Every structure is written in C-alpha cells, then in structure tokens.
Amino acid sequence: MTDADLLSVGSEILRGETIDTNAGYLGGQLNDLGFRVLGVRALPDDRGTIAAAVREARARAQLVLVTGGLGPTHDDLTREGVADAFGEPLHEEAALLAALRDRFGGVAEMPATNRRQALIIPSAESVPNPIGSAPGWWIDRHDGALATMPGVPSEMRRMFAEQIVPRLATRFAAHPSASRTVKTFGIGESTLAERLAEVLEGGTPYEAGIYARDDGVQVHFTSREHPEAVESAASRALELAGIDAFGTDDDDLASVVLRGLAAHGVASVSSIEWGTGGALLAVLSAAQSSGGAPYVGGVLANGAADTPALAAEAVLTCRLLPQDRHGRSRVQIEMRGISGVQPIEARVHGSGPQRLRRAAFATLDATRRALIDG
C-alpha cells in the first residue's frame, strides 16, 4: 500500500480565517485512488517550518502533496521551503516567466512580484495552471514523489485532476479501494450504531466508520481486498436502517425528495421559510436532481403570518422556532399541495448556521417520509 502525507500551507488556516477544504478533497481522492493518507498538517507561512515539515513527510510517505503558498507575495514561501527541504537552489525558468507574462498581457502589465512564480529547482517539473498564475511542481525521486499545488480550491482541484492524477497512475502501483456510503436522517449516531452493530463491529474484512453531519448520519464501508464484502455490508446496512436511510453514495436529501415528488406526479416545487436565513432555498437550489420535480424558487418570510408562495404545484414550508432554555429548537413543517399530508413538528439541534441547515434538512426528510407513507 502506498502512503501519502498532506501539507496545507497558510497562516490564515491556523488563524481560523480560512477553512482548509483542500485537505478533505485530496484525502477523499487519494483514498479512491488506492493511497493510504497518513496525516494532514496545516503549516504557517514560514520557510523553516515548511522545509522541516516536507522533510518529515518525505521520511514517512512515498507521496507528499503540498497546497498553498505559491502566490507572488512576500509571505508565499512554499517554493523556498521545498527548495530547502531538497537542498537545491531556486532559479528563474525562462519558459515559466514567458508564460506568466503572456497571461498578464506582456511585460508592462505583469506586476514585478509575479516573477517569483517563475522560480523552480532543478529536479522539479513545472505543472501548468490553466486558470491561475501559480504553477505547481512535480518532483519524482527514487524514494517517492512530491507535488505542490495552489491553495485556491478551484485551481488546485483542476490541477490535481488534469495533471497530478495521470502522474500518480504512472508513478505508483496503487490499488483503488471499494467504497460504499449509506446515508440516513432522523436517527442519532449512537442509535444507528447499535442498530448496525452486526456490520460495524468485529472481524469484518472491511473498514467501517460512522459520522454525524448536518444532513444526517453516514456510514462508510471501504476495502481494497474485499469489494464484495463492502457491497454486502452496504446492502445489509440499508436493510437495518430501514426508513431512516434516504440513499447511498452520491445521493443528497434534496434530490431524493425532488425525485420522490416527481414520482407522485408533482410538476413543480417552491418553498417558504421563516427563521432559517434561506437555508431551505439554498439546499434545494443546489440539489443534483435528475428526473426530479423542478424547483422554481423560494420565499424568505419576515414574520408575516400568511406569505404568498411562488407559483408551484407543491410548496414546502418551514418555520424554525426560537431555541428553548436547553438550546433545543423545533421546526414546524407543512407540505402544501400534497394530498393527505398533515403538518408536523420536528426537533433539531445545533447553533448558528448549523441549526438553520438542520431545519432545512428536517423539512426535506419529513417530506420524504410523508411520500413513503402516502
């Protein structure tokens, strides 16, 4: 099995000003490609710290991926840190400089500070960045490989998919793992763990994990050697979870509900919400629905008792009530235009944006269950 280590560079991550989504994305991608991720480390914009972290990562993993710190300013020090770790001098590469100047439209238009992005070490291969000014590096040694990529998520993801993944396939004989996810809502993590004990505990030829998220509790099964066991475990978990399971793998709750409404003959859907800051509208708008009832938009009510909805055959309404003295909340849910469905109340936990999103997901899950019962 090939081991990988992830390094995320940026003092803003350590200060809490930026959430490191790159590490989560790369961890999932590497797992799917058959790598074992040993760890993730966030680093400040400090040349010595970056160099030491790169040396440590290379000593324990065959693949090291570094994101961030490739910009043109004085505090973008990943190039210098990696150069120090490999003991090689930086030099300006003419082809990189020409590409940068072309990107900015010529010599006069390019800020002088961007020349730093044309620096590279002798053993590194430049990795093109089609949507940004920061090229990456690919360094391939007998004891492993290292890649640097921009910290901007859109730039990093495209570079990884188009440039780094093909290099990984050529360089490493990694074996992709089989993976399945069962998704639930309306059941607590510990209760679900008890219900699924036979597929989660003891002597299984796969790894199993259970995780609580805003949109419910997910159960993950993975194995490199026993894909058939993963399929069997996921199927059994669906059976044991029963109505609390809303889907698997890439399913999202909003899409499942929109498809369920379409199956019940609903031609269009809108929403009205109170006290949720537009969380329900945001979740429904982002649904990856294929074959679902079209979502035509929503209304954010400002306390009015009777707020008109957008024209739609079915309207999902959601009213989030104030938290009680224990920090618990209730959400009043109604599904207008769906015959035989009565208004209900559901309890949600959490605070801040999490509380608002959970109210939206509770509304969707109540709709899903009502469609099943109907």
Image: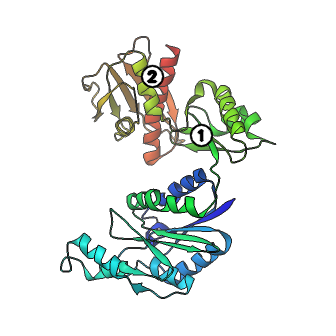
Q: Nearer the viewer, residue 285 or 162?
A: 162
Q: Amino acid at mark 1?
A: Gln
Q: How is the image coloured?
A: rainbow
**Quarter of the rendering containing residue 334:** top left
Where residue 275 sits in the image (x, y, percent)? 36, 37
Tell me the quadrant of the picture where the N terminus can be found: bottom right
Residue at 44% from the left image edge and 15% from the top image edge: 341
**Circle 2 sits on which residue?**
260
Q: Amino acid at mark 2?
A: Gly
**Quarter of the rendering containing residue 277:** top left
Above/below status of 109 relative to 349: below
| Residue at the top extreme of this rendering | 340
Above/below status of 258 relative to 39: above
Mark 2 falls on what kind of element? helix
- Asked if the residues shown at circle 2 and circle 1 are in contact, with their CB atoms under 8 angstroms apart, the answer is no
Where residue 203 sits in the image (x, y, percent)? 81, 42
Left or right: 54, with 125 as reference point: right
Mark 1 falls on what kind of element? strand
Can residue 191 be seen at all in this image of the molecule?
A: no
Query: Residue 218 got which mark?
Result: 1
| Residue at the right extreme of this rendering | 203
Residue at 23% from the left image edge and 72% from the top image edge: 104
Q: Nearer the viewer, residue 29 or 102?
A: 102
The residue carrying pointer 1 sits among few (fewer than 14), some (14 to 19) or many (20 or more) residues within 10 Å by Cα, namely many
